Image: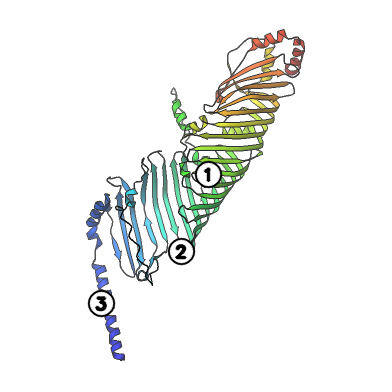
Amino acid sequence: MKKPVKYIWLALGGVVAFLVAVVLVFALAFDPNRYKDDIERMARERTGRTLRLEGELKLAFFPSLGASVGGVTLSERGSNREFVALQSAHAAVKLMPLLHGQVIVDAVRLSGLKAQVVKNKDGTYNFSDLLEGGEAKPAAKPAPEKKGKSAPVKFDIAGITVDRASILYRDMSSGQEISLTDVKLHTGRIAENVQDKIELAAAAKRNQPLLEAKVALNATYSLKPDAIGLDFTAKLDDSNVKGKLSMARAAQPSYSFDLTIDRINLDRYLAVSEKKKPAAGKQEPPKKEEAAQDAPVDLSGLKGLNAKGQLQVGALQVQGLKLSNLKAQLKAADGRAEINPHSASLYEGELSGALSLDGNANRIALKETLSNVSIGPLLRDVAQQDRLEGKGNVALDVAAAGATAGALKRSLSGAANVRLRDGAIKGIDIAGLLRKARAAAGRQSGQAADSKERTDFSELSASFSIKNGVAHNEDLDVKSPLLRIGGSGDIDIGRSAISYVVKASVVGTTSLTVPVKLAGPLDAMKYEVDYRAVAGDLAKSKVGDKVRDRLKGLLGR
């Protein structure tokens, strides 16, 4: 009995040896490069794209089934424009585990990958045709379950390595372009219930608004059946980021995050390029500056986003505004997002409020309270205006909608309140105007505001109603030991201009009032005083002598 069994094993061994020999001979003799033309032709017939295999094809059959390829390009459908190019790639699948329903992939390596992703004006992408299936067929009745049904295929990838890669995204509707260059990626094992590490580095660039950044990410990921979890540290130029990110699997994925950033200057990424000075004798067209200020604003990216989380930033600069100890909670769903509540320290004071963004209507709403803030440096940093000093409170409740920054300003509506103490109005010296009023010099032409002049005050309060980008005020109240100043008028936020009348009087009498009209662009404001009307009021006043005495005490030099 033993001999027959022995012969059977010898026979089987011989068969296996023969099969292995056949496979080896086939692997050594088979040249896949002979079929390049056929592969390119089939790709063209089935996809309408041009595939070029310029490098050498290499196949391996044992112990892993793998392939290496180089010099590959694939065009867009019906065009010679390049969609994907690849210098080299290698991947292999272990052969024996396939017999047990397991796909165990050795490390995947890609080098010199270049991809151009284009979103067309109709909303389709330049790869949409690759995702399209054939004509829909009636759904077949599900077959009855069989006992001993095979288990689903399990995937296990040892790791992915990508180097010298670049990806370009272009939106044909908005003109926006985003590029990632010098992309390097290395992952650990990718399989269910596996925890491993990932490393990523890239240079990012966007054309509008202009953004340039270098990113380096080191993270630990966890692949669980009910979520994808990521604990990471990252470096964005000079900023250090630490956080947690997770995604819940559902029909519409939802994300949660917890981010901490030590410091970040967003203006480094959002600022436009420096303006070049025009050559001598030439003036730069004004439309260029207007176009730069009217940058597009697109909140449509909020659509389809379902996320919640929190953010902490030690120091932040954005649009010139400098904040510290920023804390914010974010919720996003149904095309809308709320950053509520949020708080921060700024300009010797505190900020708290709520911000809402609506991607369905491209609308922004803001409720903000600034407490005990130094208003001068705040306005200089944010608005590039040096017209007001003082410390106090500011309350904003505003909303705006529009496709550009200019449209948002022109649609601004809501209300604002200001209360300041121990400050000054810059560009005009009300006390000096009162002194000149004694000479009744008559009406003079408009005079440019002088940044060296100022009107000091102990208290200032004003409320504004805002509609269509114009802030209207009726209750300006400025107090100093010997002066009272009121006023009314408009500040056109959309056009950055002012049309306002200030009326100043001496404390203890209303017989002398100096009307001053402020007009023009905020950065080139002019004022005009009606001295003749002042002189007439002074001459008619029964208390003229008393007023003159007070003026001498106030203005005499």
Q: Secondary structure at mark 1?
A: strand
Q: Position of residue 448 (x, y in %)?
A: 58, 19
> Badge 2: few (under 14), some or many (20 or more) residues near its Cα, within 10 Å?
some
Q: What amino acid is found at the position of numbered circle 3 in the picture?
A: Phe
Q: Which image quarter is the N terminus in?
A: bottom left
Assess whether mark 3 and mark 1 are in contact (beta carbons under 8 angstroms). Answer: no
Label for residue 170? none
Q: What amino acid is found at the position of numbered circle 2 in the picture?
A: Glu
Q: Quadrant of residue 67?
A: bottom left
Q: Position of residue 299 (x, y in %)?
A: 48, 40
Q: Is residue 269 above or below residue 200?
A: above
Q: What amino acid is found at the position of numbered circle 1 in the picture?
A: Ala
Q: Is residue 144 above or below residue 493?
A: below
Residue linked to disc 1? 337
As measured in the structure, the alpha-carbon distance from the residue carrying label 1 to the one carrying label 3 is 67 Å
Q: Is residue 403 above or below residue 130?
A: above
Is tag 1's residue or tag 2's residue first in the polypeptide sequence?
A: 2
Residue 22 is left or right of residue 220, and the answer is left
Is tag 3's residue or tag 2's residue first in the polypeptide sequence?
A: 3
Q: Position of residue 157 (x, y in %)?
A: 41, 63
Viewer can see residue 521: yes
Instruction: Choose between 451 and 279: the one closer to the eye.
Output: 451
Label for residue 18? 3
Q: Position of residue 468 (x, y in %)?
A: 53, 28
Q: Which image quarter is the C terminus in?
A: top right
Q: Secondary structure at mark 3?
A: helix
> Badge 3: few (under 14), some or many (20 or more) residues near its Cα, within 10 Å?
few
Residue 527 is left or right of residue 548, and the answer is left
Label for residue 192? 2
Q: Secondary structure at mark 2?
A: loop
